[in-house]
Image (cartoon, rainbow, N blue to C red):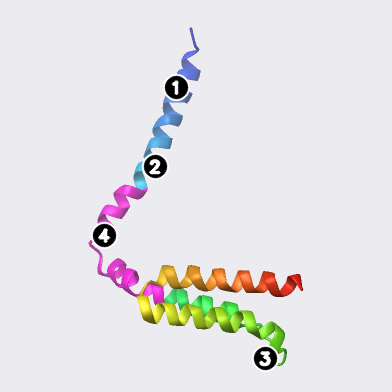
């Protein structure tokens, strides 16, 4: 028969694990009614786009047209797709895909 110390340790570990997994759902239920969370849900996609824009274009080589092609086309795809579909996730994924594909193709040569 297992030692009572071992049983206590397993039960305590299970209780702590269950509590840590349940805690976010308990906190999330209260946050859903919050005005702040509603504001962030409405404005975060634009904020993410601005941060990605600044990050991706921070080292843009304006004097080297060969290295300017991939970021410029990816930016055009992202902006065009976002204006057309108004879907931030689709725009970000498509722009990233175009940038990675073009960068990989241009570096292969």
The magenta stretch is 24-46
Q: Is residue 19 above or below residue 84?
A: above
Distance between mark 4 and mark 1 Cα atoms: 36 Å
Q: Which residue is mark 2?
A: 21
Left or right, 6 with reference to 62 = left
Q: Residues within 10 Å of mark 2 (few under 14, many from 20)?
A: few
Secondary structure state at the residue bearing disc 3: loop
The residue at 50%/77% (across/down) is 51
The residue at 62%/79% (across/down) is 70
Q: Which residue is mark 1?
A: 8
Give the farthest residue toward the right. 109
Q: Earlier in the sequence, mark 1 or mark 3?
A: 1
Q: Residues within 10 Å of mark 1 (few under 14, many from 20)?
A: few
Q: Which residue is mark 3?
A: 62
Q: Earlier in the sequence, mark 2 or mark 3?
A: 2
Q: Which residue is mark 4?
A: 32
Q: Nearer the viewer, residue 50 or 2?
A: 50
């Amino acid at each position: 028969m297992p030692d009572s110390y071992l049983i206590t340790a397993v039960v305590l570990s299970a209780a702590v694990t269950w509590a840590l997994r349940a805690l976010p759902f308990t906190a999330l239920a209260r946050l859903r009614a919050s005005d702040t969370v509603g504001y962030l849900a409405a404005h975060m996609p634009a904020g993410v786009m601005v941060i990605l824009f600044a990050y991706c274009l921070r080292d843009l080589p304006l004097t080297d047209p060969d290295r300017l092609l991939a970021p410029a086309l990816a930016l055009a795809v992202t902006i065009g797709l976002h204006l057309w579909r108004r879907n931030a996730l689709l725009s970000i994924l498509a722009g990233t895909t175009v940038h990675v594909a073009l960068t990989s193709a241009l570096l292969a040569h």
